[in-house]
Amino acid sequence: MKRKIRIAIPSKGRLRQPSIKALQRAGINILEEERVYVSKTSDPRFEAIFVRAFDVPLYVQYGAVDLGITGHDLILEREADVHELLDLGFGKCQLVVAVPENSTIRSVKDISIVAKVATEFPNLSRRYFEGLGKQVEILRVRGTAELAPKLGLAEIIVDVSSTGETLRKNNLKVIATILDSTCRLACNKISFRTFESEIKEFLSRLKQGGLE
């Protein structure tokens, strides 16, 4: 008998509730949402695992879970070798390059010296600037990139923006967009073969349930 299929759900943040609702539209209700990491679901073939969205790609890649819901930007940042089975349509955002509003840097072309870049996305940032032939020093920060220019830590930040409101509140302006992102259903490559019929049925139910 096959074991249960494990689906990783963001444990908190803006992706948590839309992810739970997406499963509900596919006919899978999570039975224990509060203060648990592993939950039974209304479909006995599946169990839900609550994981930080940033870590979901690695849990999927290494087979700790079979499926995972997380951002396309996070899959690329973690360089995870997974199948992206479906664009779920929610969690729309952009990974952008931003500088203070009074900065003389108006585009990435204006970066002429080895500038410091504060970001939670060091891998994507490094590849982006290397692709432009720009020498920068990447400083990895967690959730406080907007503070870096104010405190003199970095001249530039790379961060996720949904509406631009946080950037505006911190007197920052966007000078480039690295990528557009939405939430995806990721799948472990071996699990896809092991549970192919169940996963394909689940995909069909997600699509029929109406994606955002």
Image (cartoon, grey):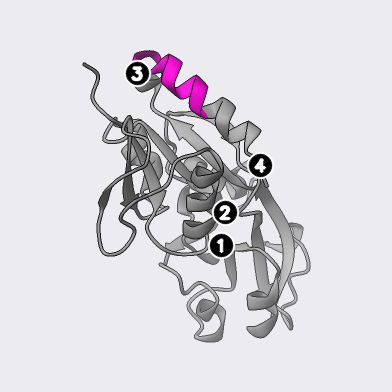
N-term-proximal mark, 4 vs 3: 3
Q: Is residue 46 left or right of residue 137?
A: left
In the image, residue 161 sits, relative to residue 80, either above or below, namely below
Name the front one of labels 3 and 2.
Answer: 3
Q: Residue at x 75, y 76 (%)?
A: 104
Question: Identity of the amino acid at label 4?
Answer: Leu
SS at mark 2 in the image: loop
**Location of mark 4 (residue):** 211
- Tell me the CA gap for discs 3 and 2: 39 Å
Can residue 163 be seen here? yes
Q: Residue at x 67, y 40 (%)?
A: 210
Residue 2 placement (x, y as % from top left): 24, 19
Q: Residue at x 75, y 57 (%)?
A: 109
N-term-proximal mark, 4 vs 2: 2
Of 36 and 72, which appears nearest the observer?
36
**Location of mark 2 (residue):** 135
- Tell me the CA gap for discs 2 and 1: 5 Å
N-term-proximal mark, 1 vs 3: 1
- Tell me the CA gap for discs 1 and 3: 43 Å
Crowding around mark 3 (Cα neighbors within 10 Å: few <14, some 14 to 19, many 20+) is: some
Place residue 100 in its image quadrant.
Answer: bottom right
- Tell me the CA gap for discs 4 and 3: 26 Å
SS at mark 3 in the image: helix
| CB under 8 Å between discs 2 and 1 | yes
| CB under 8 Å between discs 1 and 3 | no
